[in-house]
Amino acid sequence: MRFLLGLVLAFALSPAWAAPLTAEQEARCAAQPIESYRNACRAAYASEALRLPDRAEEATSSRSGMMAILKPRGAGPFPAIVLMHTCGPIDADQMRYWTRAAVERGYVAFVLDSFTQRGAQQGTCDWRGDDMRFAVYPTRTRDAYDALRHLASLPFVDRNRVFALGFSQGGRIAYTLAGARYAQMFGAGLRFRAVASVYGRCRNPVTQRWWPQNDSATPLLSLLGGKDADGDASECVPLFEKMKTAGLPVEWHVYPNAAHCWDYAQYVPGRQVPLWGVAGNTVRYEYDPRVADDSRERVFAFFAR
């Protein structure tokens, strides 16, 4: 029951962390014709905005577990990628892998940390109703759009080529970023060029709400593991097929033998990790360097179009 309450609160205001909205924010939320989106919008704006880095580092890999903007050498303007972590704290090895790949390919890499400044240094994977300090999903969606606007203000960034890439919980956020409603709530006229979700679950197991949006307008790539009980391909693919038939810009690829967190070098050997809401209440985490490298190439090929 506490878990159910926690997920419900992710889409509604809670007095423990609610803050007044500005008139502009309230107007954006009130303009949404669907109540659940109005509530998500208000919940996101009720959380204090993140303090974003005011300068970039010229490096190929991020500092351990920290929010940072990294850029290639030179004045640019460069395309940019917002990297969105899992439900846990930022994993330094995983983020070094992706930031190095981005910077070496000429992208600015923004490692976005939605948790530390909000007192969730250990992540939100195990949060229940009593633990809720902010509405995780709508707030992280707002964070990504705040990061987009911040990058667009920097002289070394090409504001027309900013992308988003999310992992697990961050992959669910990537699904929402593709939706037109969320862009209206938080984008202030800016949109991501494209977004990619890596092992992101498609449906909330309690509310049965889908994270991929039926008004998706931004090109979306989803990469999934055939042996992943969390980012369940058998659940996602039929939805993606319907979206594509409806003319929405979605693509996907399934790695038949891949489990969850295939780019986390720490999961050697693979092991079962407790997770409520999947069969057996555990999910297999297993590093697969070949899948990690192939997913890297697919993501950057998708962004380069």
Image (tube, rainbow, N blue to C red):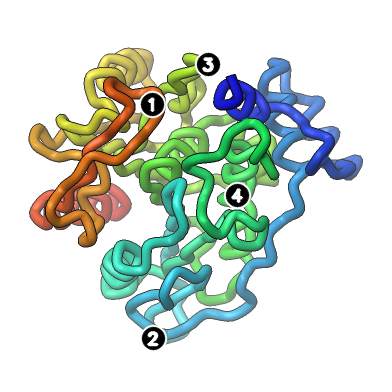
Q: Nearer the viewer, residue 69 or 204?
A: 204
The N terminus, quarter of image: top right
The CA span between labels 4 and 2 is 25 Å
Residue at the disc numbered 2: 73
Left or right, 222 with reference to 163: left
Residue at screen point 57% across, 30% down? 180
Residue at the disc numbered 4: 145
Residue at screen point 20% across, 49% down? 262
Residue 147 appears in the picture as rendered: yes
Q: Nearer the viewer, mark 4 or mark 3?
A: 3
Residue at the disc numbered 1: 202
Q: Is the residue under label 1 in contact with that under label 4 (CB below 8 Å)? A: no
Give the image quarter of residue 142. top right
The tag earlier along the polypeptide, 4 or 2, is: 2
For label 1, count other residues whose C-alpha is less than 10 Å away and answer few (under 14), some (14-19) or many (20+): many
Give the image quarter of residue 242. top left
The tag earlier along the polypeptide, 2 or 3, is: 2
Residue at the disc numbered 3: 207
Q: Amino acid at mark 1?
A: Cys
Q: Is the residue under label 2 in contact with that under label 4 (CB below 8 Å)? A: no
The CA span between labels 1 and 2 is 37 Å
